[in-house]
Structure formats: structure tokens, C-alpha cells
Amino acid sequence: MTFQKNILITGGAGFIGSHLVRLMVNKYPDYRIINLDALTYAGNLENLKDVETKPNYAFERVDITKSDEVQAVFAKYDVDSVIHLAAESHVDRSITNPMAFVETNVIGTVVLLNAAKNHWKDFDGKLFYHVSTDEVYGTLGPTGLFKETTSYDPRSPYSASKASSDHFVRAYFHTYDMPVVLSNCSNNYGPYQFPEKLLPLFINNIKHNKALPVYGDGKYTRDWLWVEDHAAAIDVIFHKGISGETYNIGGNNEWTNIDLIYLLCDIMDDELGREKGTSKELITFVKDRPGHDKRYAIDASKLKNELGWGPSVKFPEGLIKTARWYLNNVDWMENVTSGAYQAYYKKQYDE
Ligand code: NAD
Ligand code: TYD
């Protein structure tokens, strides 16, 4: 079968990647979607059970830092487009092991750029799309929003590595005329997020009556976006984005951590049939994250005005759906919280 496009999605077994793979496989049967993922602790093929037998889906277990293996995938599928999400994605891990972030996020991205440049004899109909984060912009005071023109000011090893990879992608646009597009998105939430990140971690802890470790005073602000809205934005930018451009993606949904946790606790009390106030008793203020960014908030008006995308799911509906998904998917939670996760977190949070 000949496909209209052969799209390599990296990191497709992760949180956002699995939602994007599902959307693209189902919405575009004429596109072949090749999911390239190393299956680190954060990648799980169970996230994609419903698409794995589709004729337009393929999986390759490959580490993006391995140049020969990446080039072989480009050749095997005659890849014409890349949507690059594979990354080390957790800020706390970047503080304890920055080098893993340099290797995957920086070197891995350059390996992919080189593989694309070598395989693409010309750039007609080609695109390298880099999925990035708003954390590259640093931190905001109480007012203002990140715009596409905001200067980069990364402050964690994670955001520094993502900023570096963004710069490499833009360098390939300017130096080699490679068609590229970038998007920088705020915090995502929803099903299939590895439970080291705030919301799935706290949902799981509440269920098991474990402490909720709130960093510092909890007065840190994040802009939360429903993960399927992010996948929908990537679809729009992939098809309609202008080469060389960057698009900010956000939920217009700012919450301080502590207010978000209070809301989650109320929702969890309802869902678990517990007396209101029970879950809040689990809140424990712990030592702050070093270099903790105070506030992230996105101005997504360029994406709305130029390409017509806007978020569709808001709080509390999205948060209720999220809590229910983790409560209903006990097998998934048990599977991903075994092994590597346990070893890492036992040290930090077990009394
Ligand atoms: P995730 O940690 O859930 O998934 C990352 C995936 O990449 C996993 O499947 C993992 O196996 C794979 N991977 C890691 N190292 C690899 C390597 N060396 N080779 C091949 N595959 C490898 O991450 P996520 O939250 O889904 O984030 C996806 C992308 O979106 C990342 O680039 C991240 O920076 C960006 N992003 C995330 C958020 C968020 O809120 N989660 C927000 C904005 C941008
Ligand atoms: P996180 O989900 O790690 O995303 P990011 O750091 O990329 O924004 O954290 C979201 C916020 O929640 C962030 O301000 C750190 C805070 N946080 C806690 O207070 N306790 C926790 O156990 C975790 C994981 C995060």
C-alpha cells in the first residue's frame, strides 16, 4: 500500500506522543504513522493498545541518540515528515541527572535533524516539526504572558536542554533551508501521564492515602492544557503552520499549585465517596524544588488568529475526567509504577 505521507513520530509511546499517534492514525488512514520510541521508564506501549493493529501504524524501538538506527528507519519507511516529541521530560530528574537530558534532548534532536537532512534529497513536501515547552522562556512575574517573541531564559537543566534543541532546529532552517516548525506548550494533563508528574502522582497518592508532597509554599502557577487539545494543536500546526515559525500553545487556564491541589482533593473526595476535606489532610509541604520557576502562562493568540486553534476542555470537567481515568485504569497504574519508578521515588517520598 502506498501512503500519502510517511510521518515519523518520536516519543509516541509517551504521554503526549500516544495521544498524537492515536489522533493521526485514526484521522488520517492515508498517512503511515511510524512511532519511534526507545521505551524508557516513561514510554509504555499499553498507551497505544487500541491502534497497534491498524494498517497505517508501525512501531520501531529505537533510541534517538543512535544515528545508524535512526537513519535506517528513515530509509525503511522513506520518511517525509517528522514530529519530534521524544525527550527526557521531568524537571526533577533533570536536576539529579542533567546529562541524560543533554544526550536525549540535545544530541538526539541533532541526530534526527541530520538523519532528515541526509535522507531528504530535496525539501519538497518535507517537514521537521519540533514539539517543545514554554519552560524555555524561563519564569514570569505576577503579570504578563509568554509570547513567541519572548527571549529564551531557561533555568532548569530540562528547559536548558529543550531550549538548546529548539535552537538547533532553527539553525537547520537558517543554515540548510530545512522546512521546520516549532511549538512551545504549557503543562499538559489527562490520561496516560507517567505518575511522577504532579496530577497523576497526587491522584494515585490520594487513592492510597499517601502524603501529597507540595514543593515550597505551593504558590507556583502553571497554565494547564487538556492533552488532547495539545494533540489537536499539533495536527493543525503540522498541516497549516508556516515553515520557520513558532507557535505557542496554552490552555488559558492558570492555577497556583495549591489551589489546583485543593480542587483535586475535593474532586477525589467525591469520586472516592470520602467525606469532604479528607484528601486535603494528606497535603504535606516539603522542601522546594531548586530553581523552581514561579509562573508560566501562555499567550496562544498567534495560533488562534492565524491557524484557528483554541482549547476545548476546561476545569473542572477536564480534571474530573482525569481523576476518573486514573481511578478506572488500575492495571495501567500498577504496570507503570513498578520497577524504575519505585526505585526512584521510594528514596524521596517514603517515610
Ligand atoms: P514523556 O516523558 O511522557 O514521554 C517521552 C517519550 O520519549 C517516552 O515514550 C520515552 O520512551 C521516549 N524517549 C525518551 N528518551 C528517548 C530516546 N533517547 N530515544 C527514543 N525515545 C525516547 O513526555 P511527554 O510529557 O509526553 O512530552 C513529550 C514532549 O512534549 C517532550 O518533548 C516534552 O518536552 C514536550 N512537552 C511536554 C509537556 C508536558 O506537559 N508534558 C508540555 C510541553 C511540551
Ligand atoms: P510537574 O508536573 O513536575 O511539571 P513542571 O515542573 O514541568 O511544571 O510540576 C508541576 C508543578 O507542581 C511544579 O510547580 C512543581 C509542582 N510539584 C509539586 O509541588 N510536588 C510534586 O510532587 C511535583 C511532581 C510537582
Image (cartoon, grey):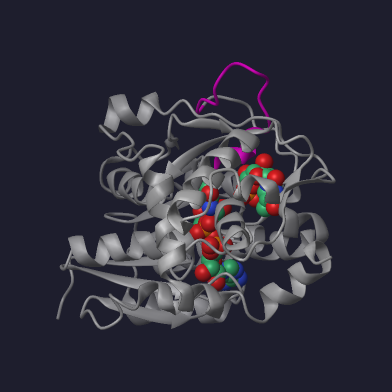
Q: Is residue 275 visible?
A: yes
Q: Position of residue 99 (x, y in %)?
A: 78, 63
**Between residues 226 and 241, which one lies in front from this camera angle?**
226
> Vertical placement of 255 versus 334: above or below?
above
Relative to residue 158, is residue 112 drawn left or right?
Answer: left
Q: Position of residue 41 (x, y in %)?
A: 61, 74
- Tell me, yes or no, whether the highlighted magenta stretch contains residue 143: yes
Q: Which residues are magenta?
A: 133-148
Residue situated furthest top in the rendering: 143
Counting labels gives: 0
Q: Main secondary structure of the magenta part?
A: loop
**Between residues 155 and 165, which one lies in front from this camera angle?**
155
Dividing the image into four quarters, tell me where ligand 1 lies.
bottom right
> Vertical placement of 156 versus 271: above or below?
above
Q: Position of residue 147 (x, y in %)?
A: 51, 25
> Where does the N terminus fall, quadrant-wise?
bottom left
